[in-house]
């Protein structure tokens, strides 16, 4: 077994956790996915997925902005750093297969997604839509550093929970496409 690859800091005074100066909480994976599933059941997948897209997009943008400042990162290396940190924090293993800021395109492979590992039902379907907003949010921030106003969206084009594949794939494209 390995050790955590993110620098976790605990504030002795108030007990809060942080990584790179950003407050974090450590929660059981089943607890997180149970909450996720309960909200999905209440709102319906389509509406919930839209809410998640917006919240995830904004959070990714802000996270990348902070991390770029903390580590002095620039351009597309911020996106790679983000994918690395997500992988180190247990969401799944995120691998950038292609990224083209000029065209606003990217393709990300995800192995061992939490939503595939924790799913309770065997019905084949795409389960990882929570990640959808994260890639566009990050890449749009990268765009601002390169004086490009990108407006991006993404979709999970294949999911390991569908039964035919052993990993998930997300594609990012400009909104107008
Ligand atoms: Zn998936």
Image (tube, grey):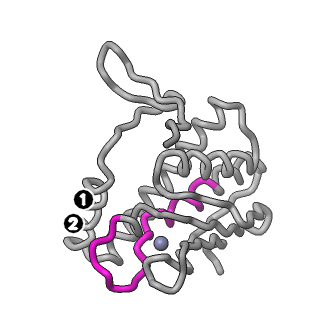
The residue identified by callout 1 is: 35
Q: What is the spatial separation of the Cα atoms under label 2 and label 1, in whole angstroms?
A: 5 Å
The residue identified by callout 2 is: 38
In magenta segment, residue 99: no
> Image point 33% across, 74% down: which residue?
47
Disc 1 is placed on an element classified as helix
Q: In which quarter of the image is residue 106?
A: bottom right
- Compared to residue 32, the image places residue 177 above or below, namely below
> Image point 66% across, 72% down: which residue?
174
Q: In which quarter of the image is residue 155?
A: bottom right
Q: Which of 177 and 92 is in front in this view?
A: 92
Q: Nearer the viewer, residue 160 or 56?
A: 160
Are the residues tagged 2 and 1 within 8 Å (C-beta)?
Answer: yes
Q: Position of residue 85 (x, y in %)?
A: 57, 45
Region rendered in magenta: 118-138
Counting the numbered discs, the total is 2
Residue 142 placement, left or right of 175? right
């Amino acid at each position: 077994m390995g050790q955590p690859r993110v620098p976790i800091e605990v504030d002795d005074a108030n007990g809060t956790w942080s990584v790179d100066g950003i407050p974090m909480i450590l929660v059981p994976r089943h607890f997180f996915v149970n909450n996720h599933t309960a909200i999905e059941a209440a709102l319906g997948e389509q509406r919930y997925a839209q809410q998640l897209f917006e919240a995830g997009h904004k959070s990714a943008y802000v996270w990348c902005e902070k991390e770029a400042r903390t580590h002095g990162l620039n351009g597309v290396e911020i996106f790679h750093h983000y994918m690395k940190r997500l992988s180190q924090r247990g969401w799944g293993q995120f691998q950038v297969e292609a990224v083209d800021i000029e065209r606003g395109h990217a393709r990300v492979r995800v192995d061992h997604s939490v939503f595939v590992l924790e799913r309770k039902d065997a019905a084949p379907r795409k389960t990882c839509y929570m990640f959808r907003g994260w890639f566009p949010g990050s890449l749009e921030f990268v765009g601002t550093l390169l004086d490009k106003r990108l407006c991006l969206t993404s979709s999970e084009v294949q999911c390991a929970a569908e039964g035919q594949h052993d990993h998930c794939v997300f594609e990012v494209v400009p909104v107008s496409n």
